[in-house]
Amino acid sequence: MTPYAVVIPTLVRESLADCLAALAAAHGPRPEHIVLVDDRPATPVPDPEPLEHALSVLGDLRDRTTVLPGEARGPAAARNTGLRAVTEPWVVFVDDDVQVGPHWCAQLHQDLDEATPDTAGVPGVITVPLPGGRRPTDWERGTAGLARARWISADMAYRTEVLRRAGGFDERFPRAHREDADLALRLLDAGWRIRRGCRTTLHPVRPASRWAS
């Protein structure tokens, strides 16, 4: 079994509990370590209750979970904070608004076991459920486009040491936009491969504002 850690940058949205519950329920070899990076601003002091509620769904994985404070500088910086706490050979970045599939851990084990020595990263397969019985809104279609993204960090595994040597995510990206593609392109330029895996992760469509069409 290839040891791995899971890093989740989070603003402790309501979706975090669903994300962690799906991870706890997934069949297969479990992560050695889960690192949650709480990227909420330090002032005013965040309410601890939502985070404690989310952690409560982890069951026996709670003992393997570390919560680190972020610096409220965006997901790229938060992922790098989590990366620094990882000692396992592989690190899997998962966003706090996704739900890994029921066999995700087993499929991830297969993905990592099949990774050739020149493979630096293995993204998962993202699925976005759209409503039936009506045309999707522009907001829903925009979210569905994530399923076609090649290097999306919603579910992306990287070799830990390769990522460290590359300098991790570029923290000049202050929000979740293109920082994942930038990292992947830097690794490809350095001669590494990125091979798509077989594991599946669900990315629900978050509710849009009433002005969304």
Image: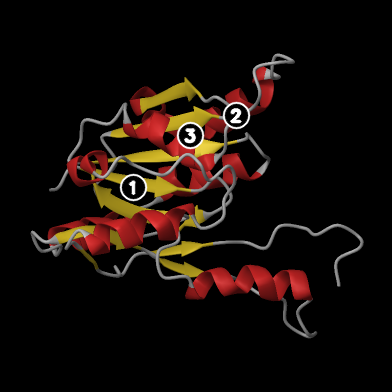
Colour theme: secondary structure
Q: Are marks 2 and 3 in contact (CB under 8 Å)?
A: no
Relative placement, left or right, of 56 versus 158 is right
In this figure, which residue is indicated by the disc labeled 1?
A: 92
In this figure, which residue is indicated by the disc labeled 2?
A: 72
Q: Quadrant of residue 151?
A: bottom left
**Residue at horizontal 31%, vertical 28%?**
84
Disc nearer the start of the sequence (2/3): 2
The answer, for residue 27, to whether it is visible in the render is no
Return the x and y of residue 59 as percentages of the image width and height: 44, 32
Q: In the rendered view, tell whether residue 127 sits above or below residue 75.
A: below
Return the x and y of residue 194 as percentages of the image width and height: 26, 65
Q: CA distance from mark 1 to mark 3?
A: 14 Å
Q: CA distance from mark 2 to mark 3?
A: 8 Å
Look at the numbered disc 3 and give the secondary structure of its residue. helix
Q: CA distance from mark 2 to mark 1?
A: 21 Å
